[in-house]
Image (spheres, helix red, strand yellow):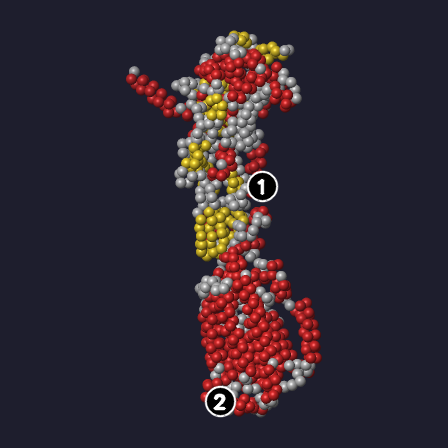
Amino acid sequence: MFRIDRRYFKNFDWVLLALLLGVASMALTNLYSASYPPAPYGIPPFIKQCYLFLFGMMSILFILFFDYRELHFWNYPFYIIIIILLLLVLFAGNSAGGAQRWINLGFFKLQPSELAKLMMVVTLASYYSRKEQNEGYGIRDMVTPVLLTLLPFLLILKQPDLGTALMLGIVFVSMTVFAKVRWQTYGLGIILGSGCAVFAWFYLLRDYQKRRIETLLNPAKDPMGQGYQILQSKIAVGSGGVSGKGYLEGTQGHLHFLPERHTDFAFSVWGEEWGFAGSLFFLGVYFSMLFWGLYAAMTARDRFGVFLSFGVVMLIFWQAVINLLMILGFLPVVGIPLPLVSYGGSSLLTTLLAIGILMNVRMRRFQSGQNAEKMN
Amino acid sequence: MKWSGYKNLEELTEHDDATLDLLKRRLGVAGLVIIIFGTLIFARLWFLQIYKGDEYRNRADNNRVRMREIAPPRGNILDSKGRQMVTNRPSFNVVLVREDSNDVDQLLKKLATALDIDISLLWEKLRDASGKPRHIPVRLLEDVDWQTLAYVENHNQRFPGIRIEAVPSRVYHYENLAAHAIGYLGAISKKELAARDTSIYAGGDLIGKMGLERLHEADLRGEKGSSSSEVDARGFEQQLLKDVEPLPGNDIQLTLDAELQKVAEDLMEAGDKAGAVVAMEVKTGRMLVLASNPVLPLNQFVGGISHKNWNALLDNSKHPLINKVVQAMYPPGSTYKMMTAMAGLATGVITPDTVFYCPGYYTFGKRRYHCWKHSGHGAVNLKRAISESCDVYFYQVGLRVGVDNLAKYANKFGLGHKSGIDMEHEKSGLTPTKAWKQKRHGQKWQDGETLSVAIGQGFNLVTPLQICLMTATIANGGIQYLPQVIEKVTDPEGKILKEFEPVVVDELKNEKQFLPLIRNGMEEVIQGSRGTARKVRIKGITIGGKTGTAQVVRLKQYKHLKEEDIPYKYRDHAWFTCYAPAEDPQIAITVLVEHGLHGGSNAGPVARALLETYFAEHLQRLADAEEEEKKNE
């Protein structure tokens, strides 16, 4: 399995690493401010995140030794492990704020639903790359991926964690559309999907989840409650102006007007302190990283590599877009973090592993087959 | 890896280049989606940070900056000798800033339990403030004690939104002394707020409600300061941004003499008397004593008077809420006889030597008008008429002068119109004329009524202040001064803004010449062997004065009763007015005791005590000299 080859080193994607480090350093800088002043007890979030980042980088190094194609083999064992973890969460998980999402490992609180996102990408990439359908996938082809998605989806929804469950759905839709399905499949999908949505609104969504959606439609109705978070976030970002209030000078964040300032609303702190200029710079680097990911898909040597890279990019992209649109007041507060930026170990590790997979695909783009011959 | 169904990686990843390219082409669509959303986010950032940047910056500042008003210490009130009568002390209120609390219900419950108070009280306060903006503090508890203060301060983390507010509160060093003149403060009412400049006043402010506190509100209130500080989302202050010190109000020094005032009030109080004591500097118009009994309990008004206490004041039969110095009118009784005498002399109807015979009554028309001395005074001249208060003499003078002339001269001495003193709701009194009766009652004047008016009964009405003013005008040689209560107004730096200056309202011309004659009679009232106020006599000071009895009702059923058997409210009012020293009058004192029956015995001693206090130094010197003389012998 281990094939140490000098070519791997030569083909290593230094640009992607640079972009990742760029985003991560800004994110950690921001996290320091977002959790400032440090609480008098426990390890400050900033330090924890730094450790986790280092751990994540070592994990990337570790997985680079394996060929990404071996995920074909490991995919289902992983899938089963994650499902077991998700079940474990439901029965023996730690709960906070009315939801049961974590498994306490003592030194680390693992959120299996985060890992499930990445697992979903891998599983679907594996499925679609093995089962090739040039004419597009028919309804019967969709049974397996739908069931594979539905199982973790429902388990996560049960926690309840609407945001993450929704992410699984979005990943599924993105990858399936990318894999190309037939028109009939779309039709049936849309009918079933909207049916489920109506059903969910009346029977599945909790009151607080409904309220969040209602608040988005009319935030002024309840300025001290749900709308408060969105309003304070908009005030934070808006008050940053062109050049921002300066690092560690953000009043919205440091005076606690901003809720969840180091987790879901971390970018509000950045926007407030660095202004429009800083926000553009940050998003410039962030989106460059995403485009580079697409480039990785473009240069991947096989179908699996393309699907994997595409899935990873979509996973990060959609989380980022949903988080940013929420911060900027376009979407309800659903609890989706900004990958790499929001505080949270499971999310950070998952994202780093995902980028590790991208690097892996990039590194092995000339390994063999036609691509390699072309280059020669 | 058999379980996966494939033998090796190569087999698994076998593919056709054409289909791979087809797949990769679709990545372009993904790129497009990323660009679209990126642009959306870019546009939104531009909208929030550039287009609406200033607006949101303001809102962020509004979030974090909390401006708090600091109440200025009110100006002090001093007496003429510089003694502090009313000053300030810090008092502490528990206030709630609703904006800083996310659960007001829960907070109030916690607070009520912790401080062991009735929660409905807190609710009421909150309801009253429901119309105000949420960042304006609502006063929950006023003037709390030290325990409460310490508890709330120490547990402020438990009560987000609850704060302690320090405000100056009034201290009355002489308790209720001169309460009616000084007045009290209260929370500004909605009506008062609507009528005032909202840049100066806000709801919950204290404002003068009565007396000088109300009349000189503008002088006393000072200017509010403010303190801007940065607060966090829970309302806790983080740092001070700007501090504007409040400007204390101006100090007011009164012409009142606290010592004299105290003597007057204590004596009235000791005798359980209702009424008024007024003393005035004869040659300036400075008011030295303005006492109205029973006094107002000023301390009950600090922090708002309770319903129970207020109703007790309202129901009191001695009417403590009325400032009897200027707001109550009584018939002047015999004190009016000086006016009748003046009118007689000035119109030439009588001379000092004109003698009328008093058989104890005077018959006019079909009616017999009695003298108070039913046995009669015999032959009476002006001096005796005044000193013994012969009614028959003045019936005849009044009749000859006519009621209109009586009114004309009375007006020159300050009766029948407002004096213009710096007090509220001053009554003008009444000096009846023929025209007045025609207008008021639509009836012709009856000459018999002139008889009553001539001896100070009938339609005549005066305030105690007016009688004092009249006495002063007689004493000073005919100059009617404006009675004033303010010696000077000084700003906090000590700069004098206003200073007392005598104001002449009216002055007698030729009629001045008759005043010594009247004073002669008045001095005889006290010094004479048959004077009606011999009891007031003080060795070493020559006093001029006059007693008076104001009829309340003349009911037959009480006529034969002994005085003490007449019900309180039907007893006559007692007057005594005087000036001293006769050689060079300095002070005029008027005492009215409601339902006090006799001027000489009931009102006189109060005036006597005041004179003794006022001339204490002089009397001491006399006593010392006498002792010296004794030793030498």
Q: Is there a contact, CB below 8 Å, between mark 2 and mark 1?
A: no
Q: Is residue A121 above or below residue B502?
A: below
Identify the residue at horizontal 61%, vertical 84% (top origin): B22
Q: Is residue A338 shown to the viewer in this render?
A: yes
Looking at the image, which residue sits at the far left? B632
Closest to the observer, B265 or B241: B241
Residue B514, given in percent of the width and then of the height, sits at: 47, 15
Residue B528, given in percent of the width and then of the height, sits at: 45, 13
Report the residue marked by disc 2: A3
User: What amino acid type should be assigned to the residue bearing mark 2?
Assistant: Arg
User: What amino acid type should be assigned to the residue bearing mark 1?
Assistant: Lys
Identify the residue at horizontal 47%, vertical 74% (top origin): A22
Residue B30, given in percent of the width and then of the height, sits at: 59, 77
- Secondary structure at numbered mark 1: helix
Quarter placement of the N terminus of chain B? bottom right
Q: Is residue A87 above or below residue B405?
A: below
Q: Is residue A236 above or below residue B155?
A: below
Q: Residues within 10 Å of mark 1 (few under 14, many from 20)?
A: few
Identify the residue at horizontal 52%, vertical 8% (top origin): B355
Quarter of the image where one finds residue B195: top right
Q: Is residue B194 above or below residue B288?
A: below
Closest to the observer, B255 or B97: B255
Res B191 label: 1
Q: Is residue A260 shown to the viewer in this render?
A: no
Q: Chain of mark 1?
A: B
Closest to the observer, B103 or A364: A364
